[in-house]
Structures are given as C-alpha cells and as structure tokens.
Amino acid sequence: MDKSSGELVTLTPNNNNTVQPVALMRLGVFVPTLKSLKNSKKNTLSRTDATEELTRLSLARAEGFDKVEITGPRLDMDNDFKTWVGIIHSFARHNVTGDKVELPFVEFVKLCGIPSSQSSRRLRERISPSLKRIAGTVISFSRTDEKHTREYITHLVQSAYYDTERDIVQLQADPRLFELYQFDRKVLLQLKAINALKRRESAQALYTFIESLPRDPAPISLARLRARLNLKSPVFSQNQTVRRAMEQLREIGYLDYTEIQRGRTKLFCIHYRRPRLKAPNDESKENPLPPSPAEKVSPEMAEKLALLEKLGITLDDLEKLFKSR
C-alpha cells in the first residue's frame, strides 16, 4: 500500500529487480566475506537475533513465540545472496505445488544472476555450496516460561535438489514460512546497484540495508552500519570499511549523504536514494520537505477566529482585504 496515495502496489520480480523480505535485508543475514585468513575459517557460524522482525510472522503470533533466532553458516553477498535471489524469483515466477517449486537448472542459474556461459563445472562450484549453506540456515521460534519451553525449528530452505543432466532444480520451503518469502512489508530491490558493485560485498550489504529503510529515513548511526556488516575486525577497521562502502555507493550514483556527529555518536544523513542509479524526472520528489507542524493557537486567537466565523468572514477574505489597502 502506497501510504501517500492509498493505492495498492504489486511488486513483481524480473531480471532487473527482486522482491526481498525486509527482515532479511535489515538483519544482516547476508554479509561480506571475512577477508583475513584468521577470520575466514571454514564453517564460521553466524547467530542473529531476529526477534524484533520475525515475531510479526503469523506463525510466531499464533503460537505465542517471543524469541526468534537465525543460526547457520555465514552467508556471503557474492554467491549466497545471488542464490537467494534466484530462490525468491523461482517461487515468485513458477507454479508452487504444495511446498515445492520446479524449474530448469539453466533458468535457475539465470535467476541467480550468474552468466550461463560459465562451464557446467563452474556453475556447480558456485550453486552447490550456496544451496548447502542456505539450506543449513536454521530459524528457531521459541517461548520459555518458569517451567516449560516451546520451540519450532525450521530452515530458510527445507531442501534443494538439482540434476544438470536432466536440467532440473527442485526447491522445497516450509509452508509455515511462505509468509517470510512474501512478507507484507516488502521493498523492490533493484539489482542494478548490486551488479554495479561486483566484488564490493560491504557496499552490497549496506545497499540492501539502506534500500529496505522507509522513505526519508532518520540518520543512521555508524554503529548500526557496523552491526549490519557483522565484521570481526577491530572497530577502527570496521569504521573504515563502512565509510569506504558508503563512498562506493555514492560513486555509482545510488545515494548522497553527509556524515555528522551528535555528541559522541557519528551519523549518516541520507539525502536521496536512486536504485536505478539515475536521477528521476522530478528530483524534488526524492527528498520532499516534511510537512510543517501545525502551530498551536492561543485561547485569545481562538476566540477571535470563532467570532470571524460567526460573521461569515474567512481568512481568505481578510487576506484580500489587506491586499486591497
């Protein structure tokens, strides 16, 4: 629903954009690859508290779950995010039978944004590890009181099957999580910016976060952007990574911003966002001025306005009177 017009807006994925659940974009499920040898060890486990976002799901509300946690291997932007884009596209563009969707392997690769010109071996080397990591990501809903604990454990994707010889891919999702795939608080994520940021995973991750924010977002703290990237390096190094990523987003024409400081808190003020990487026809609509708050009327002035209203005199009449003098 467009709040300004009340019009119902349907978001449809295509090759240039994808409909992404806002929660996954804000939470930092997909993050940059850890660069250092010390931090990039295999099987790095990631744990994310998703309570604030995912307790809104009907599953959580119906069962009274008050804690949601996402646990699993660290999902990167370069391969895993693109594979997730392909999964979202698959469920959006193909018939879902029960809890499964089936499509040609070659088409799935295209939906992931991977050039089909790559050899079959290279495609397998990219797709297979990503599917394993995504299928290995656990979402747990739980509620604990003084005596008992109730918990529902599921996966981001229940199962994935592919056969390159038969040219087939089958994806299975938890029916109770279909709402996550089609979250009612969605944004249309333009892939143009992602493609313009090849191998710049920190900038890609910040893009998915910033694009998920509402119109005219409040200033974003440096600490919040650090948390979105979920890096393991010293804070000073993380700050450098955030600033470099923000500058890269400005270089491709996605946004403009100013870094300010309030007390000891460093903030980024976003002036505009351009997911299509080009200025709109009417640039004034990018960052509209907020409506001026109505001024409080004193009791004395209220009495005068009431008297004028009884006499049938409007404010327009008074304005014309003063202009004629």
Image (cartoon, helix red, strand yellow):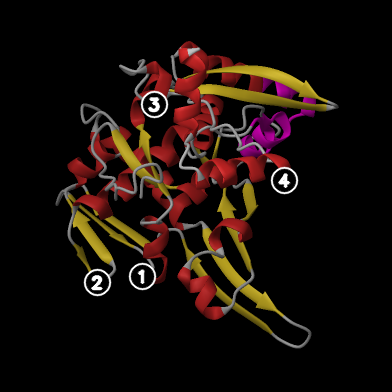
Picture disc at residue 299: 4
Q: Residue at x 45, y 52 (%)?
A: 134
Q: Which residue is mark 1?
A: 175
Picture disc at residue 98: 2
In the image, taking residue 75 as reference, residue 158 lies left or right, namely left
Q: Hey, which residue is sitting farthest right in the picture?
A: 263
* Nearer mark to the viewer, of 4 and 3: 4
Specify whether residue 221 is painted magenta.
yes
Q: Amino acid at mark 4?
A: Pro
Give how far across and how far down residue 49 sits, in percent.
65, 56
Residue 315 visible somewhere in the drawing: yes
Q: Earlier in the sequence, mark 4 or mark 1?
A: 1
Q: Earlier in the sequence, mark 2 or mark 3?
A: 2
In the image, taking residue 144 as reference, residue 306 lies left or right, namely left
Q: Residue at x 38, y 38 (%)?
A: 82
Near mark 4 (Cα within 10 A), the count class, few <14, some 14-19 or many ≥20, is few
Q: Amino acid at mark 1?
A: Pro
Please tell me which residue lies in front, 99 or 35: 99
Q: Residue at x 57, y 54 (%)?
A: 72
Q: Residue at x 34, y 43 (%)?
A: 5
In the image, taking residue 288 as reference, residue 279 lies left or right, namely left
Name the secondary structure under disc 3: loop
Q: Are marks 2 and 1 in contact (CB under 8 Å)?
A: yes
* Nearer mark to the viewer, of 2 and 4: 4
Picture disc at residue 275: 3
Q: Which residues are magenta?
A: 219-241
Q: Earlier in the sequence, mark 2 or mark 4?
A: 2
